[in-house]
Image: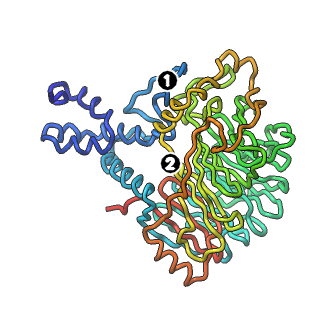
């Protein structure tokens, strides 16, 4: 029965907006009437928004639970600007091709950038801007749409240890290996503030604050417009701080043994959970993004993936389902184990974009052949199936009342063993996807110039690799613009 043709156009649009991108493209070839209905850009915009939300902001629970879900309108998404001037059908096509390229490890475009005098030690790419820092303290700002250098200035004294920036405020923070923190205005190149930060091991920025993680495992929030310290946490005894991630109005803090969600306003711990690794496993570093934690151990790169938390576990924790959802630390995660080369050969790990692709680079190889790997990930539906397969994981879910009573006592539970050693946490193991297309060209270029990959960052469909002699190699998974 031809239902879309027998109902008003508005209802037909709602029906089509529930389909996947590939199914929608097939429907447009069925008949002329369907073709003209599917010329409506609002349908493609809605489908595109749902596709982008598949990892970052799912619109329905992963599995049956007692959580309540705030309904959202499919055609309106905070991820997409409310304008129909863009060709959303083309955007959908680009996204499908990009996802396929990621899945197969196929590079579509290659760019080389050269403006630095020394080796690249830090890279940060997000929202159309790329900042690159070298061993002499210089920082270059690039436009990722044209890959032209917009500015170059001396931001630090000596090699740069940490680098981040706010796109909205155009404010950059640089911490040198000598322990000096400097905050710069990227528009005016004016130095806003400078102070000693010799004990800072990690940092991040949003549009309002600079968040610093100290060596003694306490967190400091700074107003980057004035350099004034607004608040800080107490020391977490016996733990080593690994990474901090800003998520809406909260901070996600990863240490060697625990992961915590803190209120960015009060720095109160809202939720806490031990990491699913045994005490005899050594963790070298970790990176968090959205709901994925990357742990680098002696033999494996562990990708720990939590399902979304839809409902607040206590009254102090407010969750807006229209925004990026936090990880559900009350449930067992899904974990991928990827075999990695010897730990001494790994120079950088990165994760970014709406799809959690993790990459490693090897310092002992002058080429990129088998040096960059995309670790496997699981979709939200795979996570749902994993929880259904293990009902005991469901039983670990405490009630809202119990969670509210004990606050964050979940962190007091005994840390489970690493995946694959008898625990109920789902796992998979793989060697990862090796970037294949054009690798020979990249390898030949690097070998000819005597370059070695030194640092890397990833955002959306772009992988940015810094080299030992100052060149920057940009690998794009997006199809070339027609």
Identity of the residue furthest to the top in this view: 401
Measure how far apart labels 2 and 1 are at the Cα level.
24 Å
Q: Residue furthest left?
A: 32
The quadrant holding residue 180 is bottom right
x and y percent of residue 475 in the render? 49, 65
Left or right of 248 in this view: 28: left
Between 481 and 418, the one lying in front of the other is 418
What label sits on residue 64 in the rendered view? 1
Mark 1 or mark 2, which is nearer the start of the sequence?
1
As displayed, is residue 114 above or below residue 83? below
Check residue 355 in the rendering and tell me which mark sits there, or answer none. 2
Q: Residue at x 78, y 68 (%)?
A: 157
Mark 2 or 1, closer to the camera: 1
243 left or right, relative to 200: left
Residue 474 seen: yes
Q: Position of residue 238 (x, y in %)?
A: 86, 42
Question: Dot 1, how many residues are within 10 Å of its Cα: few (below 14), some (14-19), or many (20+)?
Answer: few
Residue 241 locus on image (x, y percent): 77, 47
C-beta proximity under 8 Å, tags 2 and 1: no
Determine whether the residue tagged by mark 2 lies in a helix, strand or loop.
loop
In the drawing, what numbered circle is on residue 215?
A: none
Q: Residue, x 60% and y 29% (percent of image)?
A: 393
Relative to 374, does residue 251 appear above or below in the rendering?
above
Residue at horizontal 67 percent and vertical 21 percent from the top? 314
């Amino acid at each position: 029965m031809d239902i879309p043709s027998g109902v008003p156009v508005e209802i037909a649009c709602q029906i089509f907006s529930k389909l996947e991108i590939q199914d929608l493209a097939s429907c447009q070839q069925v008949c002329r009437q369907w073709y003209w209905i599917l010329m409506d850009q609002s349908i493609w915009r809605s489908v595109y928004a749902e596709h982008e939300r598949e990892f970052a902001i799912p619109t329905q629970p992963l599995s049956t639970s007692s959580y309540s879900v705030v309904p959202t309108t499919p055609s309106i998404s905070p991820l997409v600007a409310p304008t129909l001037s863009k060709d959303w059908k083309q955007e959908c096509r680009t996204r499908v091709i990009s996802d396929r390229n990621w899945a197969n490890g196929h590079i579509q475009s290659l760019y080389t950038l050269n403006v630095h005098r020394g080796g690249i030690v830090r890279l940060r790419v997000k929202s159309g801007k790329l900042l690159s820092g070298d061993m002499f303290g210089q920082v270059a700002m690039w436009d990722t749409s044209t890959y032209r250098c917009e500015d170059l200035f001396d931001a630090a004294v000596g090699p740069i240890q940490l680098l981040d920036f706010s796109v909205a405020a155009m404010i950059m923070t640089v911490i040198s290996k000598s322990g000096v923190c400097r905050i710069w205005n990227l528009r005016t190149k004016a130095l806003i503030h400078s102070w000693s930060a010799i004990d800072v091991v990690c940092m991040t920025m949003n549009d309002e604050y600079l968040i610093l993680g100290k060596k003694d495992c306490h967190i400091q929030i700074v107003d980057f417009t004035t350099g004034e310290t607004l608040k800080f946490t107490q020391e977490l005894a016996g733990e080593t701080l690994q990474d901090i991630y800003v998520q809406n109005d909260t901070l996600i803090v990863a240490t060697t043994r625990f992961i915590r969600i803190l209120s960015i306003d009060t720095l109160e711990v809202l939720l806490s959970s031990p990491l699913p690794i045994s005490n005899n496993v050594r963790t070298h570093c970790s990176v968090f993004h959205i709901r994925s934690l990357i742990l680098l151990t002696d033999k494996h790169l562990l990708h720990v993936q939590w399902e979304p938390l839809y409902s607040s576990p206590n009254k102090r924790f407010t969750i807006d389902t229209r925004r990026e959802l936090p990880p559900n630390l009350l449930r067992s995660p899904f974990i991928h184990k990827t075999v990695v080369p010897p730990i001494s050969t790994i120079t950088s790990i990165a994760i970014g974009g709406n799809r959690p692709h993790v990459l490693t680079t090897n310092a002992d190889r002058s080429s990129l052949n088998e040096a960059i790997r995309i670790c496997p990930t699981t979709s939200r539906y795979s996570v749902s199936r994993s929880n259904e397969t293990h009902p005991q994981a469901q039983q670990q879910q405490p009630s809202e009342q119990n969670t509210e009573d004990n606050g964050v006592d979940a962190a007091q539970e005994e840390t489970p063993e690493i995946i694959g050693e008898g625990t109920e946490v789902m796992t998979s193991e793989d060697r990862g996807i090796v970037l294949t297309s054009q690798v020979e060209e990249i390898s030949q270029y690097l070998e000819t110039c005597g370059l070695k990959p030194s640092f890397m960052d990833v955002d959306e469909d772009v992988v940015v690799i810094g080299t030992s002699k100052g060149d920057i190699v940009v690998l794009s998974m997006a199809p070339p613009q027609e």
